[in-house]
Image (cartoon, helix red, strand yellow):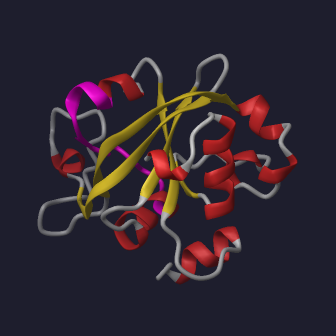
Amino acid sequence: MVSEHSIDLFGFRGSMNHWLMKSELDVYPYAKLVEDGQTHWDGVRNYQARNMMRDDMKEGDLILFYHSNTKPPHVAGVAKVVREGYPDFTSWDEKSAYRDEKSSPENPRWFMVDIAPVKALSTVSLDAMKANPALEGMPLLRRGQRLSVQPVDEAHFDEVLSMAGVSRDEL
């Protein structure tokens, strides 16, 4: 079940099991996830995104893996959650760029999930998504939407797959 804060923030009702996660192409591309086989999604320092990872993301949930801060920004693949939310140890690692002095193993402030690749997709650009009326209301396409982790309703998820020439059966 989706936590109350997600319903308030995005206007969705009921169970949610599709997400979009952003990574910069030069920081952690989808190809690196494929190479690694799985990874922990650390360094998220936004409370809304943290709450979704901590409270709402469940093992098996599907993720649109989105390359941001590139031209053009685009969905590059599908991943899945393989470990539900747990404390982000980088927040108390003194050598980490994501260190937060107010977080500790005893009182973690930040959380992460583990993800694994499912399928690389033909690029679905942000402009193509904006031009598709079937994606109206998708959080990614809203003005000012900058969260690195955000929900995607099932119809929007399936439409992005369709734009990439993939059906859900192929996942």
Q: Total number of numbered labels? A: 0
Residue at the spot x=58%, y=24% of the render?
69
Residue at the spot x=67%, y=20% of the render?
72
Q: Is residue 31 above or below residue 47?
A: above
Q: Position of residue 49 (x, y in %)?
A: 48, 58
- As for residue 59 lying within the magenta part, the answer is no
57 or 147, which is in the foreground?
Answer: 57
Q: Position of residue 154 (x, y in %)?
A: 61, 63
Q: Is residue 123 above or below residue 65?
A: above
Horizontally, is 92 left or right of 10 in the view? left
Residue at the spot x=42%, y=71% of the render?
56
152 or 51, which is in the foreground?
Answer: 152
Q: Is residue 155 above or below residue 21?
A: below
Q: Is residue 111 something that shows in the picture?
A: yes
- Please identify the quarter of the rendering in which residue 14 is found: bottom right
Q: Is residue 3 above or below residue 149?
A: below
The segment highlighted magenta reads: 33-47
- Please identify the quarter of the rendering in which residue 59 is found: bottom left
Q: Position of residue 82 (x, y in %)?
A: 26, 56
Residue at the spot x=47%, y=61% of the render?
47
Instruction: In the displayed orientation, state which residue is furthest to the front.
Output: 169
Horizontally, is 12 left or right of 78 in the view? right
Q: Is residue 153 something that shows in the picture?
A: no
Horizontally, is 136 left or right of 124 in the view? right
131 or 25, which is in the foreground?
Answer: 131
Q: Position of residue 76 (x, y in %)?
A: 52, 30
